[in-house]
Amino acid sequence: MTTVQRNTVSARRSTPVGATVDRRDFPLLAAHPHLHYLDSAATSQKPRAVLDAIRQYYENDNANPHRGAYELSARATQRYHDARARIARFVGVRDTDRLIFTRGTTESLNLVASAWGRANVGAGDEVVITGLEHHANFVPWQQLALERRAVLRICRITADGRIDLDELASIVSARTKVVAFNHVSNALGTVNPVGEIAAIARRHGAVVVCDGAQGAPHLPLDLDSLDVDFYAFSGHKMLGPMGSGVLVGRRDLLEAMPPYQTGGDMIEIVGDDRTTWNVLPHKFEAGTPNVADAVGLAAACEYLDTIGMERVHAHEKALTTLATERLTAVPDVKIHGPSVELRGGVVSFTVGDIHPHDLATILDQEGVCVRAGHHCAQPLMRRLNVPATVRASFYVYNDENDVAALVAGIEKAKTLFQSA
Amino acid sequence: MSSTDALYQELILEHNRKPRNFREMPDATATVEGRNPLCGDEVRVWVKLEGDTISDVSFLSPPGKGCAISKASASLMTTAVKGKSRAEAEALFERFHDLVMGKLPESEHKSLGSLRALGGVSRFPLRVKCASLAWHAMHSALDAGPAEVSTEREGNAPPPTEGA
């Protein structure tokens, strides 16, 4: 590796709900000391190590990889290769060729639905998703089914926002070509039992697709031993840059399916009337790759590994438990989703009849950043019969002060709305 | 006054709690549904015209699908445009829109009557769409425009561009 920077995670041996890192590692948080950023499920803040890695790449190594017959281009190629290897190590993938760079989870899932789906799903076949999905893992499958005249089956969820495994077992059949579901729900924080879901799909030979947008940033991962065929995630939710993302696929499936986009870099021989494809991973990376952001994402993986993903997970667990306790103690607060043991670093809630947007505006005035709305999961919200919720989500830089500010802001909103 | 207090004035909170003309209107001349796809909010507006005069106007938003700002704005709108001519209502919409966009000169705020209470919205660009949703629907109803309007679609003017 040339210059992937050893970053400076100032690890504090912490109380259970102190931050796992020094806020000063994050320039935006350092510049806004009174900000309580509780929207990491939407996007995370970036440590200096990531920003520096991107800058260093552009300042020292930038050229078009895989092309130039000069040393600088070779260096850019090496940086790109090293970044892929570093990220693969982070998620437990030994065969780095099966790690494809994309713009993010959305593109990764569209790649599978489009390239694999069109080649493998036909009229009368069935595509199974769940009522818990983000639009990114819902709409591509819905559109595939419409286009291929296949049947889209949406697995029921329980009242507390878990995938109903009995229902899943009853709708997956020999006609099922694919089962797609999220690792962790972005709207409710539900951590889904990937192994159990995959086992149901396997009984009938269905391909297993996992949306890991909320998994990879928060849970220790060993994809080589996780029973999924495709796993998608985004760099920007795990301290990396926006516009970076990953699809990890099973090698034989990736080799057998047609490319997603065509153009430069992904070809082997271009004849006048036919073209042959480059090997993995290049077959799925048409055009000049986003090397800088791959390098940035690799630096994010380095940063997270320095903390340790077990510790990241334990930290989020502690904050979620604390927030759940404190919020439960506030009259009129209703927390949506499963009990805290089954949840990742997300608390989704409503407060009496105060509309989530009004609550978010009032919280914003107190420096508390939360998401309010349908969380890109309208089918889920319909099933829960909740038009919108407020979502607070936690990451390595959050601590108990953020939870306290959240609770204080809610109290303030309640006072304001009750006084009318 | 803090920004929050400027936004959530007494009158806004009161209209949110007890919205005026919050009912269906079976004999309406026109009805239009306004939607904000970004937040999922919905409001339906009914307008009854007698000649050129708005003789009645009402609105509803499904439970949980209207924030305080959108409900209060719709409620205040119904009280403000009832009895007005179409042209007067449209002119009021333009001035109201200038108010929430922060473009209306201070000296003209008074002319808006109780609608002034929504002036605080101008400090919250993300909430301008909430405040103008019902107005867009009313505009379309008066104009025999589309039966559904969206804050994210062109052609909901005047004026179509809003912050965020």
Image: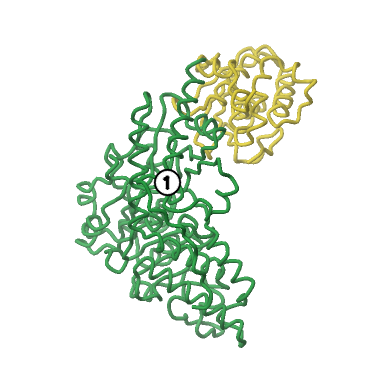
Chain colours: A green, B yellow
Q: Reply above or below: A84 against A159.
A: below
Q: Is residue A381 left or right of residue A4?
A: left
Which percent across, then down, holds residue A387?
A: 43, 33
Work out which residue is located at the far bottom of the displayed protein and give it.
A69
Q: Is residue B13 left or right of residue B157?
A: left
| Numbered disc 1: secondary structure | loop
Name the residue located 24 percent from the left edge and 50 percent from the top edge.
A168
Q: Amino acid at mark 1?
A: Phe
Which percent across, then down, holds residue A391?
A: 43, 39
Q: Reply above or below: A415 against A403.
A: above
Work out which residue is located at the far front of the displayed protein and give it.
A13
Which percent across, then down, holds residue A212?
A: 38, 57
Name the residue located 50 percent from the left edge and 44 percent from the top edge.
A37
User: To which residue does mark 1 refer?
Assistant: A394
Q: Residues within 10 Å of mark 1 (few under 14, many from 20)?
A: many
Which percent across, then down, holds residue A216?
A: 39, 58
Name the residue located 43 percent from the left edge and 51 percent from the top edge.
A396
Q: Chain of mark 1?
A: A
Q: Reply above or below: B130 against B59.
A: below
Q: Reply above or below: A178 against A411.
A: below
The quarter of the picture where residue B147 lies is top right
